[in-house]
Structures are given as structure tokens and as C-alpha cells.
Amino acid sequence: MSAILPSSAFTISVSSFTTTKSKTSVSFSPPNQLRNSPLSSRRSLSRKFYRVQATTLQEDEEEVVVEESFRTKSFPENEIKEGIGETQVNSPSSVLEQWIIKIEQSVNIFLTDSVIKILDALYHDRDYARFFVLETIARVPYFAFMSVLHMYESFGWWRRADYLKVHFAESWNEMHHLLIMEELGGNNWWFDRFLAQHIAFFYYIMTVLMYAVSPRMAYHFSECVESHAYETYDKFLKAKGEELKTLRAPEIAVKYYTGGDLYLFDEFQTSRPPQSRRPKIENLYDVFLNVRDDEAEHCKTMRACQTHGILRSPHSYSEDDSEEEPDCMVPQADCEGIVDCIQKSFKSSNKAKE
């Protein structure tokens, strides 16, 4: 059972929805190709991108078929949509909207590449310090998203509990990545802490403003950051894999990945059903393998979020109510960004008066 999405969409391989001893990894196309993928103009631009494929690596490095990455209705017991990519290809889009998307993503790529160049210059031979800075930065968008979503709720513009749940779970996951890097000594230098904290401060302000104006742009920017994090860990595993297999796993990693309550671990992985991924941590290699795979899951969730209103908590799916709307949703106030919310608020007021 496999479905191959358009070349610019993510794909994931899951060899059934049962727990196996396999380790999942996703191989990304080149960074710029991945990040620059307009959502509403895939038909005209999809030829420019490499196909993104996913493999399930068994002990003998066997590759397995790929499946759709983000399920918009239900898990295998029920029907699923063909995929985000195809839905967006079939959706009509104005030329103006296409240009707006191109501008948004061009700005995101420029900003991301600028930060990457700074990190490359400062941390080309200091891996754990670089990872500490990356993880400090990577969790900031989820704080920003939740801040704006709470503001929307206060004004009664848009209420969806699933977004808050998933983004909190994502921030929880990134926090444990950060704790792992701190246990490995990534924050030992004062300069590294100073740089990471100040970048995070300005990144938070920027993301709040960006998300308030254009959630699509903010989600794409976060996808760019998570994509870079994936690539960074993937290169590290390939370069120092054998050495990492001889080192002990940090205690915080063992507790997080193999602890008793893994509800939040399942919650941020919106492309798979709960309990379908249970990591096995035996050494430091396993830790970084799972950190890398977490970043791939974040990328898929951020890509899905760029289509407004479709995100669902993995725990909200069931066989009985797959067609029902989430309990905590107010569809009449559905909007994207502050400008759109204000416009729809006025429209709703005018209709009520009429």
C-alpha cells in the first residue's frame, strides 16, 4: 500500500502501523529545493524539485516503499484524502496569491540561509554547541504560534484545540532535545548561551508578527528551520556514526524516549497514528537517530499546517467519529491572520445586523 505524492510534498514510509525494530529515516532533497515550494502553484513549479523519498532502514539497510505523509481525515480504518499536495494542485489560485507565496518563501529562504551561514562560520567544528543553539532556536516558533492562537481565542476569532495541543507537544519535544544537548555539554560556553538566547528572543518577536499577518509564511519558515536541523543531524550521524555507537546515551534521552507516558511524544507526530513509533535507545547513536527523525516529523507537520484549518491531533482520530468536526472549533470565525480575522469579524457583524 503506497502512494507517491507530488515531488515537492513530503512522503513517509510506515511498514504497517505496528511497532517494529526498524529505525525510520527520511532523506530530504537539497535545502533550497525543499524550502522553496509554493503551495498554490505546485502544478507549474513541481518539475523544479527533486522527489523527496522516505525509507525504513532495517538492520540490513533494506529500503521499503513509501506512503503518504499527512492524513487529513483518519487513519487506515477510514478513507483518507489523496494528500495535501494534490488537494492544493487542484485548488484554483490567483496569480496574485502565487506571487505572494513566492515572495514569502523567498524571504524565508534568505533569512534561513543567512542564519545557517553564521552557524557554519561559528560552529564548523563544535557539534554539540551548534546543536544547543539549533534546539534553542527551533522551539521558539511553537511558543509564538501558541501566543497568537491564545490571542485569537480571546477575541473569539478562531478556536481550535488541536493546533494548541500539537504545537505544545512540538515545543515539549524540542525542549527535550535541548535538555539532551545541555547534558552533552553543548551549553558550556557563555558565548553559546548568549548567542542562542538573543537569537531566540528576536526570532520570537519576528515569528509572532509573521504568524499574526501570514500563518502560512510562519509555518513555512519553521519548516525551513526544521529542515536544516534534520540535515545537520543526518550529516552528523553519517560522519560519526561508529563513534556514537560506542558512547552512552544521556539519561534524559532514555527517560524521554522510553518513559511510561508517551502521549505528548505521539501528539506532535501528526503523520502517524499514536503508538506507532516507539524508539529503542541503547547508545548515543540511537539518541541522535531519533532526534533527527523527530525533526522530520516536525517538517511534515509544518508543511501540513501551511494548508489552513486541516491540522488534527493524532489522538482526535477514531473509527466512530472520523467525519465529525472537533469539539473545540468555531467555524464561523475561521480566519487566517489578523487582517483576515478583522475583515471576517466585520462581515459577521454586518450579517448579524441584517
Image (cartoon, grey):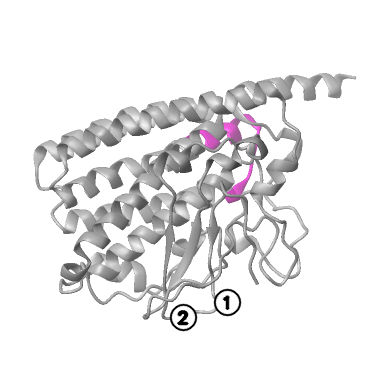
Q: Secondary structure at mark 2?
A: loop
Report the residue that reaches farthest toward the front: 47
Kindly check if marks 1 and 2 are in contact, taking CB atoms under 8 A apart as contact: yes
- In the picture, measured across the screen, residue 43 lies left or right of residue 154, that is right
Q: Amino acid at mark 1?
A: Ser
Q: Residue at x 32, y 27 (%)?
A: 202
Query: If the image is split into quadrants, where does the N terminus sit?
Result: bottom right
Report the residue that reaches farthest toward the left: 189
Q: Residue at x 63, y 45 (%)?
A: 160
Q: Position of residue 327 (x, y in %)?
A: 70, 53
Q: Position of residue 180 (x, y in %)?
A: 24, 58
> Is residue 152 one of those drawn in magenta?
yes
Q: Residue at x 18, y 51 (%)?
A: 127
Q: Position of residue 280 (x, y in %)?
A: 34, 76
> Is residue 63 one of those drawn in magenta?
no
Disc 1/disc 2 C-alpha distance (Å): 9 Å
Q: Amino acid at mark 2?
A: Thr
Q: Residue at x 56, y 34 (%)?
A: 216
Query: Looking at the rendered structure, which numbered label has been put on residue 16?
Result: 1
- Alpha-carbon neighbours of circle 1 within 10 Å: few (<14), some, or many (≥20)? few
- Toward the viewer: 141 or 96? 96
Query: If the image is split into quadrants, where does the C terminus sit?
Result: top right
Q: Vertically, is 71 above or below 211?
A: below
User: Can you identify the residue that label 2 sits on?
Assistant: 20
The magenta stretch spans which residues? 147-162
